[in-house]
Image (cartoon, rainbow, N blue to C red):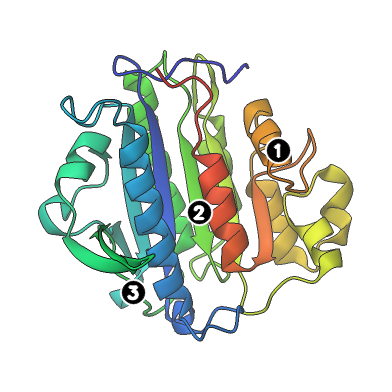
Amino acid sequence: MAYEAEISRRNPTCFLFLIDQSGSMGEAVGDGSGRRKADALAEALNRLLMDLCIRCTKEIREGVRYYYDIGVIGYGMKNEQIGPALGGNLAGKELVSVCDLAESPLRVEQRPVDGRMLRFPIWVDPVADNGTPMCAALRRAHDLMQQWVAKHQDSFPPIVFNITDGQATDGDPEPAALAIRQLATRDGHVLLFNLHISETPATEEQRRNWLYPGADKEATLPDDYARLLFRMSSVLPPHIVALAQAEGMPVSTDSRGFVFNAPMTEIVRFLNIGTQPKNLR
């Protein structure tokens, strides 16, 4: 399948973010900043959501164009629940249009940038509590994407990003991941990318072997859990491979959308690359 469909207001695509909100996300990231993983992830995700809104704005007078449906599902929280992570007027909604997203941030903060104060919208607040019900989150993602592709068969396939720092505490996530990847529009199967955050930076050797590995690197992964996440992940479509290679990222034609023990900088890079469409009109 080609992954060539034009993304337009008639045929939008969908990005779904599954974010680990378990207790271990309260630990510090491995960049020496002292920031909690939950805080760093919320910062990166809010910045990405803002960028997605900007990408869909061609003319200020016209406003944001409906190119994307976007969802953010948190898992962990209290009592190992899963549920929508957007707040404010979007609270309780699992998928929203990029137009509604742009109109309804939870709040807008003022941030200093190059000596100026700029507006920074916030949609997602950091959470770090309880276990890691990844299986339940993936099953919910499957149900949402099954409904979405049934209504958008001419669209570029949805991309599901699962961002976590730990193992599932509610069973084996592989069957649910396979079910997601078996869904499809006429343009290709739904893509599932798994991004594993680490408390410590990757070494250069780990960077070569554990970031976007192909089949030849599976044996170098450190344990069964890493190999499980690898198997759960989709092969990168050609346009993402090309974008990543242009950024100097260590990818090949059989690389999967998977990083293990990655610092937050790599998570951010991959989110930016993975959400860049090929044919946005």
Quarter of the image where the C terminus is located: top left
Residue 150 sits above or below residue 129 on the image: above
User: Which is nearer the eye, 192 or 176?
Assistant: 192
Q: Which residue appears farthest toward the front when viewing the image? A: 115
Circles 1 and 3 in contact, beta carbons < 8 Å = no
Residue 184 sits above or below residue 247 on the image: above
Residue drawn 10% across and 52% down?
89
Q: What residue type is labelled 2?
A: Asn
Q: Is residue 75 left or right of residue 90?
A: right
Q: What residue type is labelled 1?
A: Ala
Q: Is residue 72 left or right of residue 234?
A: left
Q: Is residue 224 left or right of residue 151?
A: right
**What x and y, as percent, mark residue 164?**
52, 64
The disc placed on residue 246 is 1
Q: What residue type is labelled 3?
A: Val
SS at mark 3 in the image: loop
Task: Let me know if residue 179 appears in the view.
Answer: no
**What x and y, as percent, mark residue 189?**
55, 26
Residue drawn 81% across and 62% down?
221
Mark 1 or mark 2, which has the lower sequence index? 2
**What x and y, as percent, mark residue 197?**
58, 68
SS at mark 2 in the image: strand
Residue that carries the numbered disc 3 in the rendered image: 127
Viewer-nearest of labels 1 and 2? 1
State the CA–CA distance, disc 1 to disc 2. 24 Å
Residue that carries the numbered disc 2 in the rendered image: 162
